[in-house]
Image (cartoon, rainbow, N blue to C red):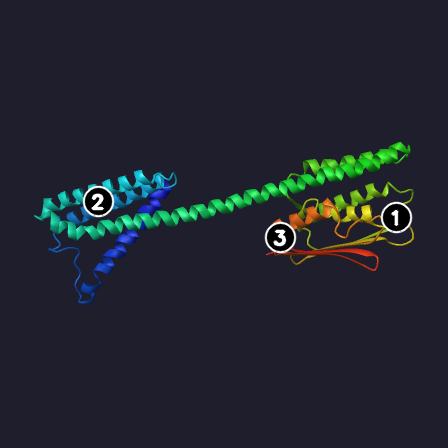
Amino acid sequence: MKKRVALFSFTFLVFYSLAIVVRQLPGMVRGRISFAEGSHSGAEWMQVTGDVLIYYLLALGVYLLLCRCHPRRQYFSLFTALLIICMASFICALLWTRIFQDVRMSRYFQMVIFPISAQALFATVFYLVRYTHYKDLQQVELQLQNRQTELSLLRSQINPHFLFNHLNNIYSLVYEQNELALSAISGLSDLLRYMLYQGSEMVLLTTEISYLEKYIALQQLRFEYPTLIEITQDCKDETAQIPVFLLIPFVENAFKHGRESYKESWLKIHISADNGQFNFSCTNFMGSNRKDTTGGIGLSNVKQRLNLLYAGLHFLEITDVDNLFVVKLRIKYGN
């Protein structure tokens, strides 16, 4: 409240000063300035000071009244109080003027009706501008909160989806009494620790790549012999950050729907970051168990997160050509 009153007071002084300058323009052209009829005596300056104070209190009262009643939609109380404030200001100004000079009420009313109306209008306009600005900020804050909530929900979808798939894999290893079951459980434990204790939305690209490599190693445990996977990196910007768990759904989709091979690289991943731009590509052979061309919840989740975090700053292309499923992602993360 103190900040609002201080800002209003400063704006009022600027507005009133401009009003005086505008009123004095005809006299300034002729080289004569007068704030009131008279000889610029001490009494005249005192009268002007009192008038300014009355007008200020009038405008401040209207502003505070609007701040109290308008948001609550108490329009009848607002209108009644405005009339009372204006009448009180007129009477105070009349009594103050009569201390210094004899003036008739009818004539004085004609003299001050415009200044009083102008101050009330100024306070109303000032309030509406501030109120509109406040509502805009409130709307932006609400949008940010909604966006953060949506991001949190999208991120929470990844963890159960991820856990569900790997528990199935580990179940198969345990059922077959495979000696790799313990390694799979240990690897899953490491990944879950990363998921649980990584609280921020953004993470260093190097950290995400490390997480990706652990994920691939965990997936490789499903096979009797490791399949051929090619990963190339060219991350010149070591400070580059990307959304956490962003890359996993693409690779997970490859393992789920791709056709693994022991003779040639069936999955090729390339990651680079430099000059404020992150590039990621993932190419894999398409398997016969593929049901659609867009993937499941994982890829849909990534698309939504990218639209929220990098609207207009990313390019995502998913194609399947010549029995190859290709994902190309480009993000501009620098200014």
Quarter of the picture holding the N terminus: top left
Residue closest to the eye, 33 or 224 = 224
Inspect the image, locate mark 1, and give the three-letter code of the amino acid beneath it: Thr
Inspect the image, locate mark 2, and give the three-letter code of the amino acid beneath it: Ile
Residue closest to the eye, 47 or 174 = 174
Quarter of the picture holding the C terminus: bottom right
Quick one: label 2 or label 3, which is nearer the N terminus? 2
Disc 1 + disc 2, Cβ < 8 Å: no
Q: Please name the residue that numbered disc 3 is placed on.
A: 310
Quick one: label 1 or label 2, which is nearer the N terminus? 2
Q: Is residue 204 left or right of residue 60?
A: right
Q: Is residue 13 visible?
A: yes
| Helix, strand or loop under label 3 | loop
Q: Please name the residue that numbered disc 1 is placed on.
A: 227
Residue 97 is situated, as x and y percent measured from the top left of the image, at: 13, 46
Q: Report, in whole angstroms, how far the alpha carbon at label 1 lies from the one at label 2.
A: 86 Å
For label 1, the crowd category at 10 Å Cα-Cα, with few meaning under 14, some 14 to 19 and many 20 or more, is some
Q: Is residue 15 above or below residue 89?
A: below
Residue 291 is situated, as x and y percent measured from the top left of the image, at: 80, 49
Q: Is residue 95 left or right of residue 65?
A: left
Residue at 25 percent across and 43 percent down: it is 57
| Helix, strand or loop under label 1 | loop
Q: Report, in whole angstroms, how far the alpha carbon at label 1 lies from the one at label 3.
A: 34 Å
Q: Please name the residue that numbered disc 2 is placed on.
A: 54
Q: Is residue 194 visible?
A: no
Q: Report, in whole angstroms, how far the alpha carbon at label 2 lies from the one at label 3.
A: 54 Å
Q: Is residue 65 left or right of residue 182?
A: left
Residue closest to the eye, 238 or 198 = 198
